[in-house]
């Protein structure tokens, strides 16, 4: 039986990586695919080879090539492995189910309360019209109920025929108002659209640290295992002080070490990460080709058209009615029915005046199924929808404010990557106006301020020489130019054949 694995997520990543390496892979190959530290990969790869009866081929260099010709059916059988796998699937299922139930609950609260309030308004409208037909009464309350009810009725008609909301629920709705033989593509489920409006669609950069490490590893492998600090600054978009801490951590994770060139320039070598089966033809001794991997800006919602507008409008109706019922439950309170002539009048016990039409009718209907309608109306039709409606607007408002700040930060990080890469590529003559990516995700609102800051941050690593030209300041970074020359010379001296695996000298399946 397999022992307990300290990092189950890392183990799953390694197994998935091997599934894409049918011809076999080394530890360096798996580290490049997963961005997991070498020591983690070295610890878990033998565990995978043991569980799935892996094939081990030892090369002349001493590196082991792992492959799984028998597939990935675990050789561990029995009750304990079965229970473990079942519990993992059950936990995953419960998580998905819980998320789905929460999304459906939000939809039920929003649409359900809207339909309840609509029914109340329409019932009050019809009862008011019936009363007016029997008695020509022009009281304020009656006409107020008719106006509110007719307004709500008009709103639902608009929602049904014209909104994007209806189209998402009914994907067969034709372009010209009829049903077509060729149904249109299925719209987004309503509960997911509502959840997207309130909470968004997740962070598109959630896996960014992993992707950035993959980019770094790929760059190192393509450049003979040698990298400089300015190159890391350009890849990651971080200033020199943070880059120094980052390169130290990367050395610990991927077997790197600092080295000094002939003129004393510090470079970082990652020989272990070169012991791979793929990409042997890509050994660049130069310092060009720094990859540009900008972060994604975060959208408020992926809903299309006017869908978010309709959600807000429906929530506004719920907020209006929730406030109304909560206020009337406090102001009018208990409603009593009193016979006056041939008519029955609904009066407020607290004020002795005629009860407002909608509140009075609702109280009368609820009293048919509950002995004390007041708390039901106050809480069920007042407090709960009011609180829900406030949160339904407040959460997106706060999220939108936060996203605006976060996107501006993302823009500057992307801008800094572009700027550092531009300065490193052409350090002899850099003008502030040259630092202009022209891309939305890399263009901060205050571009001039961002340009000055990027130049100062690179200047903290290598002091520039500044001259004044006709079109403005020109920055020259002679130290960066010398570092580039020393780096390229050092890379040229690295023998790419030193990382060759060599022939197979031992095969566990022979």
Image (cartoon, rainbow, N blue to C red):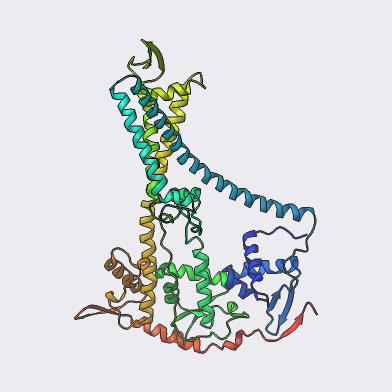
Residue 303, given in percent of the width and then of the height, sits at 43, 54
Q: Position of residue 127 (x, y in %)?
A: 39, 25
Above or below 500: residue 137: above
Residue 1, by quadrant, is bottom right
Residue 156 pos. (x, y %): 40, 41
Residue 225 horizontal/vertical position (percent) = 54, 80
Q: Quadrant of the C terminus?
A: bottom right
Above or below — where is 481 with respect to 296? below
Q: Residue at the spot x=59%, y=48% of the render?
A: 97
User: Which residue shows up at 27% across the image and 75% down it?
Assistant: 433
**Front in this rendered view, residue 349 or 33:** 349
Of the pair 242 and 318, the residue shown nearer to us: 318
Task: Determine the residue positioned at 32% across, 25% down.
Answer: 142
Q: Is residue 81 left or right of residue 290?
A: right
Task: Indicate whether 487 appears above or below 4.
Answer: below
Q: Is residue 423 visible?
A: yes
Picture quarter containing residue 359?
top left
How many discs appear?
Answer: 0
Residue 396 visible, this angle: no
């Amino acid at each position: 039986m397999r022992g307990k694995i300290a990092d189950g997520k890392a183990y799953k990543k390694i197994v998935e990586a091997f599934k894409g390496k049918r011809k076999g892979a080394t530890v360096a190959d798996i580290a490049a695919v997963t961005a997991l530290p070498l020591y983690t990969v070295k610890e878990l790869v033998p565990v995978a080879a043991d569980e799935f009866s892996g094939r081990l081929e030892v090369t002349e260099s001493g590196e082991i090539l792992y492959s799984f010709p028998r597939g990935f059916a675990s050789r561990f059988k029995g009750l304990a492995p079965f229970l473990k796998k079942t519990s993992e699937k059950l936990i995953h299922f419960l998580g998905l189910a819980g998320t789905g139930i929460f999304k459906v609950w939000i939809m039920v609260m929003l649409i359900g309360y809207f339909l309840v309030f609509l029914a109340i308004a329409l019932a009050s409208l019809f009862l008011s019209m019936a009363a007016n037909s029997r008695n020509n009464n022009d009281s304020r309350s009656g006409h107020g109920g008719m106006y509110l009810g007719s307004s709500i009725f008009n709103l639902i008609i608009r929602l049904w025929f014209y909104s994007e909301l209806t189209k998402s629920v009914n994907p067969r709705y034709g372009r010209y108002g009829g049903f077509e033989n060729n149904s249109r593509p299925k719209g987004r489920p309503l509960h997911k659209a509502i959840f997207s409006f309130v909470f968004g669609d997740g962070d598109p950069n959630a896996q960014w640290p992993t992707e950035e490490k993959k980019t770094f590893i790929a760059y190192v492998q393509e450049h003979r295992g040698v990298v400089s600090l300015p190159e890391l600054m350009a890849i990651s978009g971080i200033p020199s002080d943070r880059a120094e801490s980052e390169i130290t951590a990367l050395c610990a994770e991927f077997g790197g070490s600092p080295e000094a060139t002939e003129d004393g320039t510090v470079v970082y070598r990652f020989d272990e990460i070169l012991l791979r089966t793929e990409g042997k033809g890509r050994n660049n001794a130069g310092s060009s080709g720094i990859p540009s991997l900008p972060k994604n800006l975060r959208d408020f919602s992926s809903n299309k058209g006017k869908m978010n507008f309709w959600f807000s409008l429906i929530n506004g109706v719920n907020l209006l009615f929730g406030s109304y019922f909560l206020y009337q439950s406090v102001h009018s309170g208990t409603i009593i029915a009193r016979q006056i002539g041939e008519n029955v009048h609904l009066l407020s016990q607290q004020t002795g005046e005629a009860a407002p039409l909608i509140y009075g009718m609702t109280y009368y209907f609820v009293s048919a199924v509950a002995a004390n309608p007041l708390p039901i109306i106050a809480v069920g039709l007042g407090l709960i929808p009011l609180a829900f409606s406030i949160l339904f607007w407040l959460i997106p408002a706060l999220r939108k404010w936060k996203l605006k700040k976060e996107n501006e930060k993302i823009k500057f990080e992307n801008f800094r990557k572009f700027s550092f890469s531009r300065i490193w590529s052409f350090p002899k003559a850099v003008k502030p106006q040259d630092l202009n990516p022209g891309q939305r995700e890399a263009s901060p609102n205050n571009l001039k301020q961002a340009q000055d800051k990027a130049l100062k941050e690179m200047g903290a690593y290598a002091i520039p020489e500044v001259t004044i030209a006709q079109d403005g300041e020109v920055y020259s970074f002679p130290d960066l130019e010398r570092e580039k020359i020393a780096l390229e010379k050092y890379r040229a001296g690295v023998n790419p054949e030193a990382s060759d695996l060599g022939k197979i000298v031992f095969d566990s399946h022979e």
